[in-house]
Image: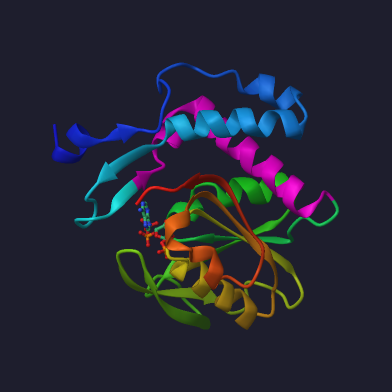
């Protein structure tokens, strides 16, 4: 067993019980979202001092190793997007951030009849690019987007798993603007509220869960 396996903590309830996602899909959004969020929160794991000392790492992968939690996550995102932007104002394009935004961005694009566009780490995309360098909670990176992947005026929603300092999301917003997209907003699973990352963003921010603790 590795040190991180040994020291991990779960956010709450048992992770092994199967969930009845179909029950939630029959409920209205107002009823279903809190129930979905509770299950998602219980499915997350935290690891102290990863990838660096002092960082409490929020691991979202248990949400994908369970079929029912994966369904819950996609349904929660769907309901949150509809509630936040309204059924008449859904995105034309979902932009997902490298790498964890790629896990659910394409699925959400299919749900909303939208396109999916990746924002990738530097050196991975061919063609004419827009780029932006940024700082995040545990390092510095450069993001790139293919310059012609968004048409001017298209409504864009940026999706990622987590907002910490907001550096990654802010850089992605800059890239969408450089391409001429209209940024509807951002949506995340978790917000590390103590870092105040949403204050860096110039469009509405929605999150399924908040983590207050440092
Ligand atoms: O708000 P910030 O301080 O910018 O941090 C948030 C970003 O950090 C993580 O990605 P990471 O760059 O670690 O890449 P990964 O998805 O490849 O693990 C996370 O998935 C966000 O994209
Ligand atoms: N604390 C954290 N946990 C998981 N991903 C992160 N990305 C930036 N900060 C993070």
Instruction: Please state the horizontal and vertical placement of residue 109, each as a whole percent of the image.
Output: 66, 51
The answer to which image quadrant residue 53 occupies is bottom left
In the rendered view, would you say 134 is above or below 137? Answer: below
Q: Residue at left 47%, top 75%? A: 144
Instruction: Please determine whether, in this image, residue 29 is positioned above or below residue 68.
Output: below
Q: Is residue 63 magenta?
A: yes
> Which quadrant of the figure has residue 179?
bottom right
Nearest the viewer among 131 and 174 is: 174
Image location of residue 73, percent across then percent down: 56, 37
Residue under the image location 34 percent in, 52 percent down: 214
Residue 64, x across and y down, in percent = 45, 36
Which residue is drawn at the image coordinates 21% and 50% (left, top)?
49
126 on left or right of 180 = left
Dominant SS in magenta: helix
Quarter of the N terminus within the rendering: top left
Q: Is residue 97 above or below residue 191?
A: below
Q: What's the magenta region?
A: 58-87
**Residue 122 position by quadrant:** bottom left
Specify the color scheme. rainbow
Nearer-the-camera pick, 214 or 109: 214
Q: Quadrant holding ligand 1?
A: bottom left
Name the side, left or right, on which 67 lies relative to 77.
left
Q: How many marks?
A: 0
Of residues 100 and 24, the one nearer the viewer is 24
Q: Is residue 80 magenta?
A: yes
Q: 7 or 174, which is in the foreground?
A: 7
Residue at x-position 73% and y-position 51%: 84
Q: Is residue 174 left or right of residue 167?
A: right
Q: Position of residue 35 (x, y in %)?
A: 61, 27
């Amino acid at each position: 067993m590795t040190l991180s396996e040994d020291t991990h903590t779960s956010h709450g309830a048992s992770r092994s019980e199967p969930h009845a996602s179909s029950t939630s899909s029959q409920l209205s959004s107002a009823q279903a979202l809190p129930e979905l969020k509770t299950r998602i929160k219980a499915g997350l794991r935290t690891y102290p001092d990863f990838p660096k000392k002092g960082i409490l790492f929020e691991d979202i992968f248990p949400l994908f190793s369970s079929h029912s939690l994966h369904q819950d996550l996609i349904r929660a995102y769907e309901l949150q997007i509809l509630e936040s932007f309204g059924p008449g104002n859904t995105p034309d394009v979902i932009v997902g951030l490298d790498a964890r935004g790629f896990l659910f961005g394409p699925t959400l694009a299919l749900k909303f009849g939208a396109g999916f566009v990746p924002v990738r780490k530097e050196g991975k995309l061919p063609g004419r690019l827009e780029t932006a360098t940024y700082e995040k909670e545990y390092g510095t990176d450069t993001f790139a987007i293919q310059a012609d992947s968004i048409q001017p005026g298209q409504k864009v929603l940026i999706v990622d798993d987590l907002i910490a300092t907001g550096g990654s999301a802010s850089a992605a917003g800059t890239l969408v603007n450089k391409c001429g997209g209209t940024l509807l907003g951002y949506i995340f699973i978790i917000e590390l509220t103590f870092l105040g990352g949403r204050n860096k963003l110039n469009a509405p921010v929605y999150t399924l869960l908040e983590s207050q603790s440092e």
